[in-house]
Amino acid sequence: MRRSTIPVLLRGFLGRESLDQARAEIERATGRSGQEAELLLVISSEDGDIRPSLEFVRHLVHLKIPIAAKVYTAEGPAALIALTTQRRQIVSRGVVSINLGMVEIEASELDEAGALRQETHRLFKDYVDEVYSSVKRLAGISAAQLGKLSAGGSLRLSPSECLAAGIVERVIY
């Protein structure tokens, strides 16, 4: 029996609302399709909020169906989401930009002494840990690329670099 494909578009800024909508769409579709489905995340995003993105990644990890990604642009949290999938492809003019995240700090996230609240610190640490964990699973990532990510906080990769690093299985179009 052939698997049905459930396409879900992740486009633009990946915030709470858009990722909750994607999650609900996945739940509805997988509820109808059962185990004979494959999820296809179509990703075209240049930025996102790390908190809902990390929650979305954790949700994907617990799904019992295969997950693939078709990447147009995956930067920041979108790159982490793409790396969570089992199979990935990228368009010939696409880009994957892995970064260690940036947290916009509001006054409410500081304690009385002006230090970062523990919850915000933990969120950022969890995000960075998840990025490193995902990147280290890639067989073709070089020590130089890992060093660039560590030193500069980001690693921008072309489709051919993604292919060489094992991020994608193929470049399309």
Image (cartoon, rainbow, N blue to C red):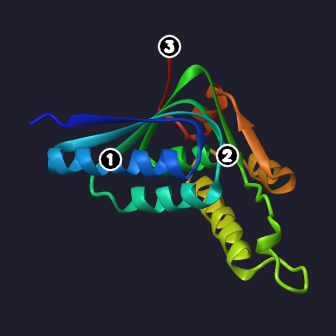
Looking at the image, is 94 positioned above or below residue 23?
Answer: above
Q: Of marks 1 and 3, which one's residue comes earlier in the chain?
A: 1
Residue at far right of view: 113
Apparent side of residue 110 relative to residue 5 in the rendered image (left or right): right
Q: What number is the disc on residue 173?
A: 3
**Residue designated by label 1:** 26
Image marks 1 and 3: residues in contact by CB distance under 8 Å: no
Q: Residue 124 is drawn in which quadrant? A: bottom right
What amino acid is at disc 2? Gly
Q: Classify 10 Å Cα crowding around label 1: few (below 14), some (14-19), many (20 and above).
A: many
Residue 23 appears at what percent x and percent y?
A: 39, 51
Which residue occupies 86% across, 50% down? 152
Which residue occupies 73% across, 55% down? 100
Apparent side of residue 109 relative to residue 91 in the rendered image (left or right): right
Residue at far left of view: 1
Q: Residue 95 or 9: which is nearer the viewer? A: 9
Q: Secondary structure at mark 3?
A: loop
Residue 146 appears at what percent x and percent y?
A: 74, 52
